[in-house]
Image (tube, rainbow, N blue to C red):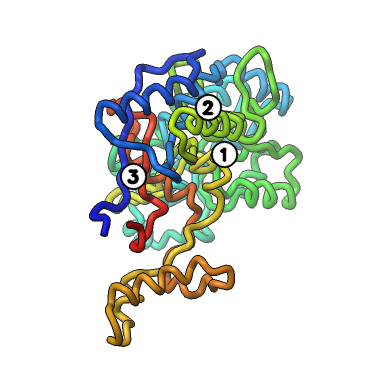
């Protein structure tokens, strides 16, 4: 039997810059790594490319002035209610600076005890000890400070995000606290919804409650332009600060890129290799309680073979319920082979978690490459689709 299952390799590339031919660069990097490390490509290998380098090669950037102009054109108002931004210097600080420049008064609504991806504003245990109810209570900054003081800062960055976010305006940002987006209707009728995965519900709640103008981050910088970057589906969602006056947007035309690379790799390796673009992985930090996924999706582009969910059984469940007749290994292999039948029932998976393939593979890629200085924006995964019967 084969002694090794899934193998994951971070592939080093040259430093990638605007205008590079990313398809050829990725192919060359994979082929050079194969020669140097003496591994061969196989059918159903998976190649992941981080979204950042795809966007960089597309020159998919917007400046502060371009964001400010789009905000002004789409709202045409002096005041704005900004609902549920995540607490992130990299993700949201420059966006908030743009908002503060575009409007005379900004009402910023923060959720508590944490934002939607788990960055905490208050100590959750202290919140319950003090009798604060996150499901019903809403309050202003003065009451927030009287209740929680100035002691709590982000456990990883050491930042007091209330003070920090206020500092990004010129005295024109007022901060409010509530998990009910309609609370801001007391102060404004215009809203920029900034949550990511719950944005559709938030927009609906505000619209139904009588808001006059409701747009999301996905509605800003989302129109095709020859002057600057854009993303028709996600707008500013998934963007990152790339300097003091520029944002890198989430890449566009992802499926076009992965299909082109797949064809190129088929020609050079002779193998059918699946390809995906990956952003933030979908996993939760057990200490800081932060859910990593600050991008709108894990994978904004993937080849057709990565659509759907894994089809597998729970090996430990099968082995522990063996009836002791015949050989255990052959019994387990027989159960695995059953999943190939057309009439196989998914209930027989015995408790395997039904996640999307792209979420699983994208998270694996993100953990492998990281966001630091490893220099491996390309990840090669081999043997992922093999099971115990693979020779």
Q: Nearer the viewer, residue 208 or 176?
A: 208
SS at mark 1 in the image: loop
Q: Is residue 170 visible in this depiction of the protein?
A: no
Q: What is the number of the mark on residue 255?
A: none
Q: Which residue is mark 2?
A: 95
Labels 2 & 1 near each other (Cβ < 8 A): yes
Q: Nearer the viewer, residue 18 or 215?
A: 18
**What x and y, as percent, mark residue 205?**
68, 52
The answer, for residue 305, to whether it is visible in the render is yes
Q: Residue at x 65, y 44 (%)?
A: 186
Within 10 Å of the Cα at label 3, are there few (<14), some (14-19), or many (20+) other Cα atoms?
few
What is the CA distance from the residue labelled 2 to the residue labelled 3? 27 Å
Gap in Å between the C-alphas at discs 1 and 3? 26 Å
- Sequence-first disc among 1 and 3: 3
Q: Badge 1 is on which residue?
A: 194
Residue 29: percent from the left, percent from the top?
Answer: 37, 24
> Between residues 365 and 316, which one lies in front from this camera angle?
316
Give the label, 1 or 3, closer to the camera.
1
| Rendered-image quadrant of the N terminus | bottom left
Screen quadrant of the C terminus? bottom left
* Residue shown at the point (36%, 26%) measured from the top left: 31
């Amino acid at each position: 039997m084969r002694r090794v299952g899934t193998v994951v390799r971070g592939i080093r590339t040259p430093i990638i810059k605007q205008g590079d031919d990313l398809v050829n660069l990725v192919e060359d990097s994979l082929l050079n790594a194969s020669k140097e490390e003496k591994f061969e490509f196989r059918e159903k290998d998976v190649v992941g490319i981080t979204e950042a380098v795809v966007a960089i090669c597309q020159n998919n950037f917007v400046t502060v002035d371009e964001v400010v102009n789009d905000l002004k054109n789409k709202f045409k108002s002096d005041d704005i209610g900004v609902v549920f931004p995540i607490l992130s210097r990299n993700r949201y600080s420059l966006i908030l600076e743009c908002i503060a420049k575009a409007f005379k008064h900004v009402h910023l609504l923060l959720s508590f005890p944490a934002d939607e991806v788990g960055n905490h504003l208050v100590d959750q245990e202290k919140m319950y000890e003090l009798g604060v109810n996150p499901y019903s209570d809403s309050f202003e900054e003065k009451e927030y400070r009287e209740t929680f003081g100035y002691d709590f800062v982000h456990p990883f960055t050491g930042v007091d995000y209330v003070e920090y976010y206020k500092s990004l305006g010129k005295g024109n940002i007022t901060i409010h606290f509530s998990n009910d987006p309609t609370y801001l209707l007391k102060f404004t009728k215009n809203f920029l919804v900034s949550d990511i995965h719950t944005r559709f519900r938030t927009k609906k709640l505000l619209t139904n409650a009588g808001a006059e103008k409701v747009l999301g981050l996905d509605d800003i910088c989302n129109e095709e332009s020859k002057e600057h970057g854009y993303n028709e589906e996600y707008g500013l969602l998934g963007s990152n600060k790339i300097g003091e006056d520029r944002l890198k947007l989430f890449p566009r035309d992802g499926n076009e890129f992965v299909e082109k690379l797949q064809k190129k790799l088929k020609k050079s390796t002779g193998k059918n290799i699946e390809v995906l673009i990956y952003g933030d992985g979908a996993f939760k930090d057990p200490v800081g309680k932060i859910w990593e996924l600050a991008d709108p999706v894990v994978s904004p582009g993937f080849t057709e073979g990565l659509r759907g969910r894994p089809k597998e059984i729970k090996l430990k469940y099968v082995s522990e319920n063996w009836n002791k007749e015949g050989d255990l290994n052959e019994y387990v292999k027989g159960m695995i082979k059953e999943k190939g039948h057309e009439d196989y029932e998914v209930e027989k998976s015995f408790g395997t978690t039904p996640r999307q393939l792209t979420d699983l593979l994208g998270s694996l890629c993100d953990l492998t490459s990281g966001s630091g200085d490893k220099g491996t924006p390309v990840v090669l995964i081999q043997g992922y689709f093999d099971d115990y019967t693979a020779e």
